[in-house]
Amino acid sequence: MEKYWRPALIAGTVGGLVSSIPIIKVANCCGLWVILAVIWAAYMYKNENGYVDIGPGAALGAITGGIVGFVSGFLSLGFRAILGPQNYYRSKVMDIYNKVGVPVENVPTEQLTSAKMSIISIIVGIVASIFVGALVGLIMGVIWQKPKTPPAPSGNVIDAEATVEESHFENSQE
């Protein structure tokens, strides 16, 4: 387990930093920064160990994804506090209710405080990042798995070269 932490911490922290920057964050709508961080972590792991198997790849991906989600979530919260309006989530949720056609009077606004929504957003982001990371790590494990060695020959295998040499030897003696 210790060998997962170094690549996961490096790639996860960098991925979280990049994915929390407001303008660049747009690319994370499809999990791009999580995917790239997990690929980088798997690459570092492969360079240290020679290969990445499926199980360790999935574990490494989940750890890296969790770190990306955690770092990104809390840094995004800081960016929002500095750059964005206080009721960022409330306005977004109200926009969704308006688009769906739910009357705004029926929306319990006391439940849409930014602190609650920020915590929910961070938790959902971490869980989604863990899931995407584990999936990408699994794929990296398939791509960079340990090469399979062919099975050892059994005692009944005939050596074709030896048979040819013996028959040649027998023919030359005649």
Image (cartoon, rainbow, N blue to C red):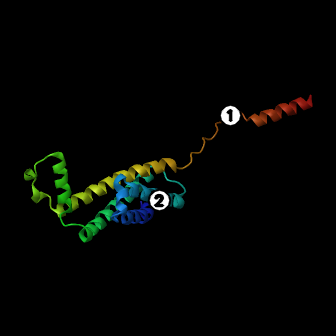
Residue linked to disc 2: 40
Callout count? 2
Q: Horizontal and vertical percent for residue 159?
A: 73, 35
Q: Horizontal and vertical percent for residue 7?
A: 45, 63
What secondary structure is found at the residue carrying circle 2? Answer: helix
Q: Which residue lies at the image location 29% right of the left edge and 57% below the top edge?
A: 125
Q: Is residue 169 left or right of residue 53?
A: right
Q: Which residue lies at the image location 49% right of the left edge and 53% below the top edge?
A: 52
Please tell me whether residue 58 is drawn above or below residue 4 in the rendered image: above
Q: Nearer the viewer, residue 34 or 66?
A: 34
Which quadrant is home to the N terminus? Answer: bottom left
Q: Residue furthest right?
A: 174
Q: Horizontal and vertical percent for residue 119?
A: 22, 61
Q: Horizontal and vertical percent for residue 150?
A: 60, 42
Q: Residues within 10 Å of mark 2 (few under 14, many from 20)?
A: many
Label 2 close to label 1 by CB (< 8 Å): no
Q: Residues within 10 Å of mark 1 (few under 14, many from 20)?
A: few
Q: Amino acid at mark 2?
A: Trp
Q: Nearer the viewer, residue 39 or 32?
A: 32
Residue linked to disc 1: 157
Please tell me whether residue 90 is drawn above or below residue 143 in the rendered image: below
Spatial distance from mark 2 to mark 1, Cα to Cα? 44 Å
Please tell me whether residue 136 is drawn above or below residue 150 in the rendered image: below
Q: Residue furthest top?
A: 174
What secondary structure is found at the residue carrying circle 1? Answer: loop
Quadrant of residue 21 in the image? bottom left
Q: Amino acid at mark 1?
A: Val
